[in-house]
């Protein structure tokens, strides 16, 4: 299993900075501090991912709280895998990812989100982008 990507750590830090700003411009509230420690080590060690084992319980809890604010599925209700495509034209997931989505853990789901967003070829990101802007999706910082 892959780890948590640095961009997700950054997004979680930014989420917590908005939720719980520093009271004095110097002190970091616990969720932000826990994630910032992980982030600093990743930058220092030039790593793109952090393993779950390397995350403190506080960092994991802060990341999971951020994760709960992100859209769960990239589906836009145009599923071409049901028509035999190996990659869905609507969301960009593979047939197996579509089939196994509900059983996937949050880290695997975020890895899929990163891949499809980077590829940007799914209709979710161009032709039908307005469908992807559901109220929950519009309130987040993106996939």
Image (tube, rainbow, N blue to C red):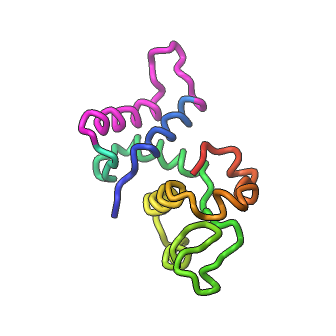
Which percent across, then down, holds residue 71? 62, 55
Which percent across, then down, holds residue 31? 47, 35
Left or right, 103 with reference to 54: right
Which percent across, then down, holds residue 32? 46, 32
Above or below 1: residue 12 = above
Q: Residue at x 48, y 55 (%)?
A: 114
The residue segment tinted magenta is 18-46
* Observer-nearest of 69 and 74: 74
Residue 20 drawn in magenta = yes
* Observer-nearest of 77 and 29: 77
Above or below 79: residue 70 = above
Above or below 90: residue 21 = above
Left or right, 116 with reference to 55: right
Quadrant the N terminus occupies? bottom left
Left or right, 85 with reference to 53: right
Q: Which residue is drawn at 75% across and 55% down?
A: 130
Which percent across, then down, holds residue 76? 69, 66
Number of marks drawn: 0
Residue 91 drawn in magenta = no
Residue furthest to the bottom in view is 84
Q: Residue at x 53, y 50 (%)?
A: 67
């Amino acid at each position: 299993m892959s780890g948590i990507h640095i961009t997700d750590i950054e997004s979680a830090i930014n989420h917590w900075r908005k939720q719980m700003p520093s009271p004095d411009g110097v002190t970091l509230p616990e969720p932000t501090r826990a994630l910032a420690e992980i982030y600093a080590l990743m930058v220092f060690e030039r790593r793109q991912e952090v393993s779950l084992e390397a995350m403190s319980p506080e960092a994991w809890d802060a990341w999971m709280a951020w994760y709960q604010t992100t859209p769960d599925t990239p589906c836009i209700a145009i599923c071409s895998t049901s028509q035999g495509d190996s990659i869905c034209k609507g969301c960009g997931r593979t047939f197996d990812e579509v089939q196994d989505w509900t059983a996937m853990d949050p880290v695997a789901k975020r890895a899929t989100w990163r891949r499809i967003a980077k590829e940007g070829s799914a209709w979710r990101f161009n032709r039908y982008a307005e469908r992807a802007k559901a109220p929950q999706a519009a309130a987040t910082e993106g996939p």
